[in-house]
Image (tube, grey):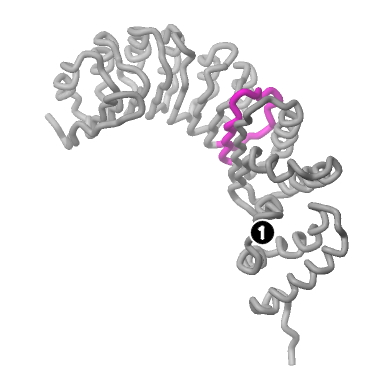
Amino acid sequence: MSATTILKLNHYCLYETFRQIKANCELNRRSPEKYWDLINFFISCERFVNVFKEWNYDLYKELHIDFAFLQAKNMVTIDLARVYESLKSVSKASKELYWKLYVNAVKENKQMNGMSITFKPSRYNPEHLDRFEVLINAIKNKISLQTLFIDVPGYSLQNVPPLGLLRIIYLNVRMNAEDLVQLVRANRFLNSLTFANTELYGSFADIVPYCKHLEVLDLTMKPGIDATKYAPQANLPLLEILRLRGYHQSGTLVKLFQNLKGRGIQRLDIPDILLSKQEAQAMLQLNTLSHILNGFSDKQIVADMTHLKNLKFVYLYARRGQLVLLVELMGLA
């Protein structure tokens, strides 16, 4: 008679195994590290994680188990505010141990193809910046990483990790243009770039020579900026989707639209401000547009769109963030 392996144990046997390990862990009264043996057991297998979650969901939440399973996740999502909240009542030694294991799990993850770090603190704490930088350092040279999402407004990304296969980048963080150039230059097959922070020190145009495969650009403009500074973005050879957020000086997008004429731009989305009559007229010269998501100060512009042969959808912003589907235009002559 062959022995049953641990991987083939039914749920009830696993429940009892969890109970025994938990009881043994609780002989040690320190927290939260007293449960590491239990955690290390069930994170060895995705099925064990799911069964443990069924067995004791309250303990699963209390132990913040998600981090322990980082080593096996393809898409790793880290909410630093949640982590800090879970650790606020534990000792300094416990925090250090927790972070050591947390960061190590990120480093050891060989399957990770996407990483998201979010943090929106109510007040600045230098310890938070240190943790953020350690996490960023943990993903350096990860050849499997294709998506990087960093939403940490109020903090700076200075030490850009050496990565080379990113296809999608989302950044809401302060940066110097030189660091952004370094990041996109290293990832020459970058397909989509979002920069959602107004605090970029230097010229965004500096990235253009290194983004030959970029198809999607989502950019938050600096408040009140002369948008002619963004005109060089038209030189991105494969650009199809352009989204410009924020408030620029009225009329200053004309140069960008003029430079886009004759290129392959298909979708234009400007959600936060009404285009001036001059900007709208320049936009109407973009015959490749199939989707327009804009607001216009001159309502007559809408009627003038009929000559755009490729236009399929027009969405008007009635007010900031509120889209109204004007009409579906299928082969409109």
Quarter of the image for the C terminus: give it: top left
Horizontal arrangement in the rendering, residue 324 relative to residue 184 (left or right): left
- Point 24% across, 30% down: residue: 314
Label 1 SS = helix
Q: Give the quarter of the image for residue 178.
A: top right
> Can residue 67 be seen here?
yes
- Point 80% across, 57% down: residue: 36
As drawn, 205 above or below 157: above
Q: Give the quarter of the image for residue 162.
A: top right
Quarter of the image for the N terminus: give it: bottom right
Image spot of residue 13 (x, y percent): 70, 79
Compare residues 92 and 311 and report the one nearer the observer.
92
Would you name the residue on which mark 1 appears? 60
Horizontal arrangement in the rendering, residue 113 relative to residue 222 (left or right): right
Compare residues 13 and 92 and report the one nearer the observer.
92
Q: Amino acid at mark 1?
A: Tyr
Image spot of residue 217 (x, y percent): 45, 27
Query: Does the magenta segment cover residue 24?
Result: no
Q: Give the quarter of the image for residue 199.
A: top right
Image spot of residue 30 (x, y percent): 85, 54
Compare residues 148 and 154 and report the one nearer the observer.
154
Q: Range of the magenta residues?
A: 146-166
As drawn, 108 above or below 221: below
- Point 50% across, 28% down: residue: 194
Horizontal arrangement in the rendering, residue 200 relative to residue 319 (left or right): right
As drawn, 30 above or below 284: below
Query: Does the magenta segment cover residue 158?
Result: yes
Q: Residues within 10 Å of mark 1 (few under 14, many from 20)?
A: some
- Point 33% across, 15% down: residue: 257
> Can residue 71 be seen here?
no
Residue furthest to the front: 89
Horizontal arrangement in the rendering, residue 246 relative to residue 123 (left or right): left
